[in-house]
């Protein structure tokens, strides 16, 4: 019994000697609680971008509708000049839905048979339902107010909202929506956590001291660790993909040639982040705790499990600078929208740029670390 207590006391003392470990042990529950509070503790826990095409020559009525829609806290309105321009932006990254106010809308409103067209991104059932219900409710209430103001009578017949989905093919269900997000998981956890441990534990074991007196260059060890981390991440992605396809059977486009570059670039971003953490961390436990905490926190910002619109606007802006956000969206576009690499030029360029910058910073930190 005394030996058990002695070992526990020894480990506790070691824990308190490592300030970085103490910091991440305390930071993890604090960050998670603050994050959940910011996301789910709001009165209206949803905000989506919606594009509006006004084809009715900016009449006072359509201007009033756009103004009132802009004032709604669950929608952020973006104005477009024509349908073609708006539809190009219709995806989960730019806008989630397009509302078209057709020609003669104001005139038809007085005649009692006005209609609008609502085209919603169908890649997420929850977002589709929230936007569809919200817009329908808005026009119902707007028409009630309009009719009462014009004719001083109560009238409950709403403006007809014709809804279309922008995703062609089979209906998108929860399985089809969640699987692409699940496949983003290894890019954060496998690549980042593996690369963090691979470097910091070598320092702890004194491997670098042996390498410095050997003919091998220290930078070659870094590249070797990168290849090993890529290999382990590939295994994680492959196993998860096979199990998802067999057990869930989602109706998705498994376009392997298009998915491989996205997985590679996403993995390199994760490995680069892990390398930076590994070079900054002073002890294996500290680096491991930091990598795990950062990975868990970042997954909420990337749209892996729930739409990024569930975040407060300032968190959405932060999420749009995280590389994994573009990887998650590109994977979802390929598997759900049948997008090609040519359609994903912006996310691919963003992933390549961030991977080059982050890995370059990691190499500089690694060289500095080795020289010390």
Image (cartoon, helix red, strand yellow):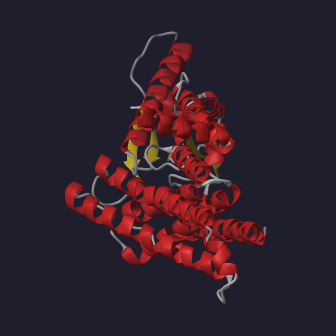
Q: Residue at x 53, y 34 (%)?
A: 9
Q: Is residue 58 above or below residue 188?
A: above
Locate residue 182: give its quadrant: bottom left
Say left or right for 22 vs 305: right
Towards the viewer: 288 or 296: 288
Q: Is residue 255 above or below residue 67?
A: below
Locate residue 137: give its quadrant: top left
Q: Is residue 372 above or below residue 329?
A: below
Residue 23 in view, yes or no: yes
Towards the viewer: 312 or 78: 312
Towards the viewer: 274 or 6: 6
| Count of number-bearing discs | 0
Q: Residue at x 38, y 48 (%)?
A: 164
Q: Is residue 331 above or below residue 129?
A: below
* Quadrant where the N terminus is found in the figure: top left
Towards the viewer: 364 or 114: 364
Residue 33 image offset from top left, x and y in percent: 55, 29
The outermost residue toward the bottom is 215
Say left or right for 257 vs 149: left
* Quadrant where the C terminus is found in the figure: bottom right
Residue 84 image offset from top left, x and y in percent: 55, 60
Residue 330 image offset from top left, x and y in percent: 49, 63
Residue 89 in view, yes or no: no
């Amino acid at each position: 019994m005394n030996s058990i207590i002695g070992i526990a006391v020894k480990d506790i003392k070691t824990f308190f000697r490592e300030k970085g470990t103490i910091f991440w042990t305390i930071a993890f529950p604090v960050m998670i609680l603050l994050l959940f509070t910011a996301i789910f503790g709001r009165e209206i826990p949803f905000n989506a971008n919606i594009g509006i095409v006004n084809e009715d020559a900016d009449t006072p009525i359509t201007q009033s509708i756009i103004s009132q829609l802009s004032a709604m806290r669950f929608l952020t309105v973006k104005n477009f000049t024509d349908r073609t321009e708006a539809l190009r932006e219709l995806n989960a990254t730019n806008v989630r839905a397009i509302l078209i106010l057709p020609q003669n809308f104001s005139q038809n409103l007085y005649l009692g048979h006005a209609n609008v067209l609502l085209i919603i991104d169908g890649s997420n059932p929850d977002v589709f339902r929230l936007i569809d219900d919200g817009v329908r409710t808005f026009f119902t209430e707007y028409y009630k107010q309009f009719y009462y103001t014009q004719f001083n009578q109560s009238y409950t017949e709403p403006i007809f909202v014709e809804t279309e989905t922008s995703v062609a093919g089979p209906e998108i269900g929860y399985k089809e929506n969640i699987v692409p997000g699940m496949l983003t998981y290894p890019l954060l956890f496998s690549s980042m956590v593996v690369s963090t441990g691979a470097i910091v534990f070598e320092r702890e074991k004194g491997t670098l001291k042996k390498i410095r007196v050997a003919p091998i260059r220290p930078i070659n060890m870094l590249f070797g660790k990168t290849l090993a981390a890529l290999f382990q991440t590939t295994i994680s992605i492959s196993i998860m993909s096979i199990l998802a396809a067999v057990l869930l059977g989602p109706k998705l486009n498994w376009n392997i040639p298009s998915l491989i570059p996205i997985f590679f670039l996403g993995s390199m971003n994760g490995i680069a982040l892990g390398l930076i953490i590994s070079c900054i961390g002073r002890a294996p436990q500290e680096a491991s705790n930091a990598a795990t905490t950062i990975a868990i926190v970042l997954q909420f910002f990337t749209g892996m499990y729930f739409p990024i619109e569930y975040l407060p606007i300032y968190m959405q802006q932060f999420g749009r600078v995280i590389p994994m956000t573009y990887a998650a969206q590109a994977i979802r576009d390929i598997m759900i929208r049948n997008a090609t690499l040519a359609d994903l030029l912006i996310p691919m360029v963003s992933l390549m740029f961030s991977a080059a910058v982050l890995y370059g910073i990691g190499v500089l930190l690694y060289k500095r670390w080795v020289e010390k």
